[in-house]
Image: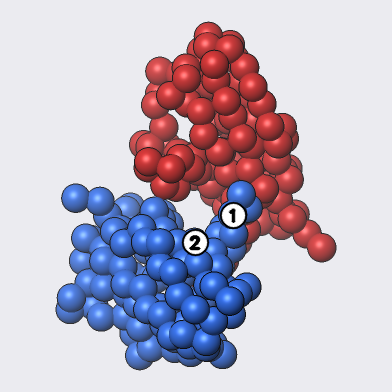
Chain colours: A red, B blue
Amino acid sequence: DARVTQTPRHKVTEMGQEVTMRCQPILGHNTVFWYRQTMMQGLELLAYFRNRAPLDDSGMPKDRFSAEMPDATLATLKIQPSEPRDSAVYFCASGPTTVPNTGELFFGEGSRLTVL
Amino acid sequence: RKEVEQDPGPFNVPEGATVAFNCTYSNSASQSFFWYRQDCRKEPKLLMSVYSSGNEDGRFTAQLNRASQYISLLIRDSKLSDSATYLCVVTVYGGSQGNLIFGKGTKLSVKP
């Protein structure tokens, strides 16, 4: 059963530390999204890739966040330096090119980040 | 104004009840609409698409009103297992890509 895999599932770190989250999209999916979810803001779009090229990262704080797809099987989201306000669940999701029309976006289980 | 707005609830209903959620969106250029379901501490999953003519999937009915820019989800004969947060999702197109924008969700709790 194909699924999006995210690591780590849980991360507790101290303010100022670097955090890297990884995502393996479903094989064959060429569209990858990173979302952040908090109680206050809900699901916020951070970055959006198609065929490994970033299409939209306007929702991402550029000074500390970066997102990349080194290859088709790996997407990364890095926070450096991390701050307490970055505490959230970070979801990676993948889908085919038709995602905007079909809504068929498959989410990973999320990486729960706590920054102390 | 948020692009997609939902009543956060919670909606507390007894088993067997009919419950309806609404969602409004601000971008009139939005072209595709969906409902997702998210169980507690789990990832969101696609529940159903929303078509202009309205569509039904078992006990679930989704409707779209483009003129008023709102989407609805009706759940009939609700089950305990329907307890979850329901997320309204809108595709907003900018340039060559479409972004899926999520509402904050409406929480439903179905009681015995």
Q: CA distance from mark 2 to mark 1?
A: 8 Å
> Measuring 41% from the left and 80% from the top, which residue is drawn there?
B19
Answer with left or right where residue B19 lies relative to residue B47.
Answer: left
- Find out whether the residues at labels 2 and 1 contact each other: C-beta distance under 8 Å: yes
Element type where label 1 sits in the image: loop
- The answer to whether B34 is drawn above or below residue B85 in the figure is below
Mark 2 sits on what residue?
Answer: B85
Amino acid type at mark 1: Cys
**Residue A100 on image: x %, y %:** 46, 63
Q: Which residue is mark 1?
A: B40
Is residue A56 at all visible to an observer of this figure? no
Image coords of residue B4 (percent x, y) = 30, 58
Q: Relative to A8, is A52 above or below?
A: below
Q: Earlier in the sequence, mark 2 or mark 1?
A: 1
Residue A113 x, y percent position in the rendering: 59, 29
Chain letter for the residue marked with disc 1 in the picture: B
Residue A32 against residue A76 in the figure, above or below: below
